[in-house]
Structures are given as C-alpha cells and as structure tokens.
Image (cartoon, rainbow, N blue to C red):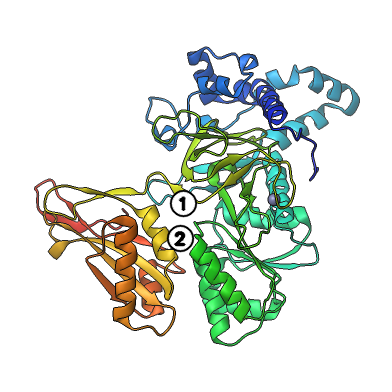
C-alpha cells in the first residue's frame, strides 16, 4: 500500500493516465466478471480498448439508483453489480500460471479470494427507498484503509493525535471508513457508536476522559455534544480537528462549530468536511484552509476514482470549474461495482485539476457546496398552482441564520385535510437569548429575500423538544425536513400521515 503513488501532475496527462487505468480495469476485472456491465457493453457494442478520450466515456450509459431497483425477469439488480469471478478464466491467465509455477496453486487461490471474496457490507441509508447493500472484498478493505489514511493526511492529522469517531455504529460508510482510516494511518481511535449506542451522556463522559485532538462525526451531533461541553464550561484546549461527514455541513454550521471550539479553549482548530457515498466505498476530504480564503475543495484520489461533472438535466459533460452533478467511476474496486454512477449530488463550484493552492497536491478537487438534485418538492402553497421549493436552498438559508441552534421544517396539510393547501411550518430552537419576535422577523426576511416564499408559521421550542422531533439519537440522520401530509386514499378521503416521505 502506498500513500504517495505517482501519477502525472499535468491535468491532460492525468486524464490519459486515468483512462489507461480504466481500460485495463474494464478488460481485466469488470467485464469478465460483472453480469450487468458485460451485458451493457455487449448491447452497446463498446470495445473497452477504444475508450481513449473523456468524450468516449459518454458511450457508456450512466448507472443510476433506479438500476438497483429495476425489475427484469430473472435479474437481481443488486447482485448483478457484484464481480463474481470465473475460476477458469482466472486460472488461464499467464500471471496465474506463473504464480502457480513458482508459489503453488494454493497461493493462486488465496490471491483470488483476497480479490473477490466479499467480507464486509455497507448500505445506503434508505431515506427515500429500500437500502442498497454494497460489498467489499479484502482488496476493497485495503483500498478503504488507503483512502481513509489519505483523508487523514489531507486533513493534516498527526499519528500522535487521539481521535474519537462519533459516527453512528451501523453498516454505513462513514463509521467504517473512519475506523479503517485509523488502522491505515496508524492513529488511536475510539469509536463511541454515536448517540444511538451510548447516548449523549456516554459520548460526553468519554470525551472528558480521552480529551481527543480530533473529533469526527455528523455535524448536528458534534454541534450538540460541543454545546453541552461548552455549557458545562469544560475545556478541551488540545482539540485541533473537527472532521465532518455523513450529511451536509453548510458554512454557517462550520462557523458555529469553530465558535464552540473557541469556547472550549481550542484556539487553533480546523473544521473540515469530507464527502463520500456508499456507492464509492471511499471518501474525500478538504485540506486545512484559512476561513477568509474558503476551502480548496474535496481532494480526489485519482488512482481510485474517475470523476465527471455533467448537466443534471441533460447528462452532457460540463467543463473545468463548471457546476453540475457528480458522476463516479471506480478504478480499482472489487465486490459491488458501479460505472458512471450518477450520484444525484450537485457541486456548485465544479471540478478543478490544477494543483491545490493550499497544500500543493496534484489531485483533482471538487470545489463548492454540494446539494441533492432531488430535494426540489412541489408544494401547493397558493390557491392556483404548485410552487417548486428547493429544500437544499432552504437548508443553507437556515443553517446560516444567527441565533438558531437547530431547526426542522414540517410540511402539513391545512387542517390535516388532504384536499387543502400545503403549509410550511418552521420549528426552531434558539441558540441564545433573543426575543421571539426579533428572530421571527429575521427568519421571515431571510426566507423571502432568498426563496420568495415564507413559512406559514414559525414555532419556538426548547432544544430537547426539537431533538425529539428530529429523531435525534434514534434515527441515523436527524430529520431536518418532515412531510406530514396525509396520503390520499383511493377513495379520495384523507388517511394516515406518511411517516416516511
Ligand atoms: Zn489541498
């Protein structure tokens, strides 16, 4: 395993280098053993050796979430994405024959097992659909360790630091990549399992005891934990890194976390974000930056992934530094493999290939804020027609308002009547002593100036009540937007509220 592999620093040469790697990966690893992609490439008549420019990639159809759910007779959309080796093909390869001659058949079989036998599973959180499992082989776990160790290096962590992993203990990427980052990098880690396993008190007790230099977890949970510590006047002056993952962390949230760290006596703390998703089986991080300069973006590992940015509507490629949807292709994965996977995540700055202005690494970087393409909902707020509301934008607006500790947006039907208009209710817990009317006016102003709509009501609650509403500590992700509109029954009358919008 090498933390400093050599790839060309010239952006054009890097693309050629990645394409050559991709062609080799397709012909040696993916196409012989992936049911799904073998049939796609046959159907489209694509010879992998002809994929020589970024433009050629467009011949490979995108893979989307719906491909995992597609119902074709006899097909198992999830299993069809797993590489299942064919022993005959493998054992006939010259490399296998040479290995068998010099090291014996057993070594050859062990090599195949390392490469292809699934050992670990993480799955999508299934907020909007059934969870999709992604399998890892020993080869993938080695890459998970490698990617995790690189995240630590990009964040400029040091081996002597003590780290606490506050991600929920679950079969999800965030917890596991953090675990393997510590073994790959060689740093002490204590995984608490988050609020779900030992509650806020258990986490606080361990933080007081371990006095970590690095805290890594979900932004909302870290915010909660740090607030409790600050309220108790606890000091944690050696805290150097707050690393965020698992959900979005807008600027306002990062500012609040930095302010809380200062309250704890930590003067020099980097609040850094990571970005990863189940289908990638890895994550990327920001390198430390000065607040005024803004982040240099997520540092991509170019030997493990090929990233494209496309127009979210047409799928057409976007140029260097143009916003669009992130499309992911692995370059060295085994187990579950997806090619040209449309993440549904849009980046507003785009992809940059010049070396990082802060740390100097010659890796591609994803710059800007990430938001989901699918968070636009049609609400019937007025008498006449539906209004398209971008909940991503609302989240950014709300996270950036001062005096707000935490919030939740609730969509209801007026009088819980399915035929009535929709109502938008904003629930807020205040961060400090500010008059209700003053904060209500400020929130309404922000809403109108940035979204042209405003909530029907703004209700204030104690922090604990809001956390209960968000499913804090019991749900994997805090519920920031809840849809309590009743689902109309086939007979046209209102029935039960939809618990899982
Ligand atoms: Zn950098």
- Residue 222 visible? The answer is no
Q: Are marks 1 and 2 in contact (CB under 8 Å)?
A: yes
Q: Is residue 460 shown above or below 117?
A: below
Q: Is residue 336 left or right of residue 381?
A: right
Q: Is residue 479 left or right of residue 53?
A: left
Q: Give me the disc on residue 477.
A: 2
Precedes in sequence: disc 1 or disc 2 = 1
- Identity of the residue drawn at 35% across and 66% down: 408
Residue nearer the viewer, 111 or 225: 225
Q: Among all residues in the image, which is located at the extreme bottom?
A: 233
Q: Is residue 244 shown above or below 117?
A: below
Mark 2: which secondary structure? loop
Alpha-carbon distance for marks 1 and 2?
8 Å
Q: Is residue 438 left or right of residue 304?
A: left
- Identity of the residue drawn at 73% across and 46% down: 146
Whole-percent x and y of residue 316?
Answer: 46, 28
The image quadrant where one finds the N terminus is: top right
Residue nearer the viewer, 92 or 53: 53
Whole-percent x and y of residue 414?
Answer: 15, 62
Q: Is residue 46 shown above or below 320?
A: above
Q: Give me the disc on residue 125.
A: 1
Mark 1 surroundings within 10 Å by alpha-carbon count, few (fewer than 14), some (14 through 19), many (20 or more): some
Mark 1: which secondary structure? loop
Residue nearer the viewer, 402 or 230: 402
């Amino acid at each position: 395993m090498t933390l400093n592999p050599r790839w060309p620093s010239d952006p054009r040469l890097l693309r050629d280098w990645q394409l050559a790697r991709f062609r080799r990966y397709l012909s040696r690893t993916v196409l012989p053993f992936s049911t799904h992609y073998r049939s796609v490439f046959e159907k489209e008549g694509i010879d992998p050796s002809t994929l020589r420019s970024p433009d050629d990639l467009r011949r490979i159809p995108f893979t989307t979430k719906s491909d995992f759910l597609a119902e074709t007779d006899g097909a198992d959309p999830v299993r069809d994405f797993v590489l299942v080796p064919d022993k005959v093909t493998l054992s006939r390869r010259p490399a296998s024959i040479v290995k068998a001659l010099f090291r014996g058949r057993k070594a050859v079989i062990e090599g195949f097992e390392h490469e292809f036998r699934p050992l670990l599973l993480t799955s999508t959180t299934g907020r909007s659909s059934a969870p999709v499992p992604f399998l890892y082989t020993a080869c993938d776990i080695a890459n998970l360790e490698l990617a995790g160790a690189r995240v630590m290096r990009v964040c400029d962590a040091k081996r002597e630091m003590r780290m606490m992993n506050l991600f929920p203990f679950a079969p999800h990427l965030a917890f596991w990549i953090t675990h393997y980052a510590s073994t790959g990098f060689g740093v002490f880690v204590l995984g608490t399992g988050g609020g779900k396993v030992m509650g806020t008190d258990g986490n606080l007790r361990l933080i007081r005891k371990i006095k970590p230099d690095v805290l890594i977890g979900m932004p909302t949970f870290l915010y909660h934990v740090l607030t409790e510590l600050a309220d108790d006047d606890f000091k944690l002056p050696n805290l150097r890194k707050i690393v965020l993952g698992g959900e979005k962390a807008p600027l306002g949230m990062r500012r609040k976390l930095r302010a809380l760290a200062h309250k704890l006596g930590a003067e020099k703390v980097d609040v850094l974000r990571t970005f990863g998703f189940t289908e990638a089986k890895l994550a990327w991080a920001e390198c430390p930056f000065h607040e005024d300069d803004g982040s240099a973006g997520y540092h991509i590992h170019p030997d493990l992934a090929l990233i494209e940015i496309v127009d979210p509507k047409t799928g057409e490629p976007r140029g260097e530094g143009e916003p669009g949807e992130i499309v992911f292709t692995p370059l060295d994965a085994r187990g579950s493999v997806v090619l040209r996977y449309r993440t549904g995540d849009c980046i507003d700055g785009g992809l940059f290939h010049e070396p990082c202005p802060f740390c100097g690494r010659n890796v591609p970087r994803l710059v800007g804020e990430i938001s989901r393409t699918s968070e636009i909902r049609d609400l019937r707020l007025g008498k006449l027609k539906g209004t398209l509301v971008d909940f991503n934008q609302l989240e950014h607006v709300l996270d950036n308002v001062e005096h707000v500790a935490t919030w939740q947006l609730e969509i209801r039907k007026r009088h819980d009547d399915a035929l009535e208009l929709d109502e938008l209710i904003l629930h807020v817990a205040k961060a400090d002593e500010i008059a209700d009317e003053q904060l209500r006016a400020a929130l309404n102003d922000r809403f109108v100036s940035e979204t042209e709509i405003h909530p029907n009501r703004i209700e204030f609650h104690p922090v604990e009540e809001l956390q209960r509403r968000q499913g804090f500590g019991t749900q994997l992700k805090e519920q920031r937007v809840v849809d309590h509109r009743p689902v109309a029954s086939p007979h046209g009358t209102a029935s039960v509220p939809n618990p899982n919008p």
